[in-house]
Image: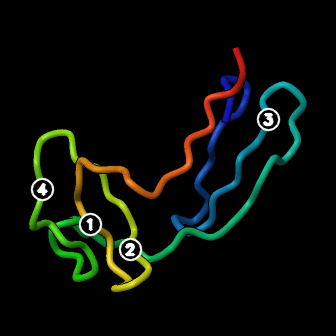
Amino acid sequence: MDAATEKIIVNGTEVIAVSTESSTIVVTGLLGPKSEMYLSQANDIDFSELKDGSTLVYNTNNTKWKATEKLDKQAIECGEF
């Protein structure tokens, strides 16, 4: 959302984003249930190689995320110069 959009929470469960420039509703939706979860509690993340600078990479073979510094299957588009 940009600076001209304001978030309003209604009844603690519904979120409505309203444009302050034109007073129109930008988006509306329901909030999910309140919960607190830490990545360390997730059972689908492999932290065995966790190091400073690691990122999470998904592995379709074991359907888990892995903390790694290696990006060996990504295709990175950097544009043309």
In what quadrant of the picture does the C terminus appear? top right
Residue drawn at point x = 67 percent, y = 36 percent:
1
Foreground mark, 1 or 3, reads 1
What residue is shown with label 4?
A: 50
What residue is shown with label 2?
A: 59
Earlier along the polypeptide chain: callout 1 or callout 3? 3
Give the x, y percent position of residue 56. 32, 58
Q: Do the residues labelled 2 and 1 touch (CB within 8 Å)?
A: yes
Residue drawn at point x = 76 percent, y = 42 percent:
18
Earlier along the polypeptide chain: callout 3 or callout 2? 3
Relative vertical location of residue 43 with respect to residue 8 in this rendering, above or below: below
| Three-letter residue code for mark 1 | Lys
What residue is shown with label 3?
A: 19
| Three-letter residue code for mark 3 | Ser
Residue 2 placement: quadrant: top right
Q: Do the residues labelled 1 and 4 touch (CB within 8 Å)?
A: no
Observer-nearest of 11 and 4: 4
Give the x, y percent position of residue 44. 28, 80
State the CA–CA distance, disc 1 to disc 4.
Answer: 8 Å
State the CA–CA distance, disc 2 to disc 4.
Answer: 16 Å
Earlier along the polypeptide chain: callout 2 or callout 1? 2
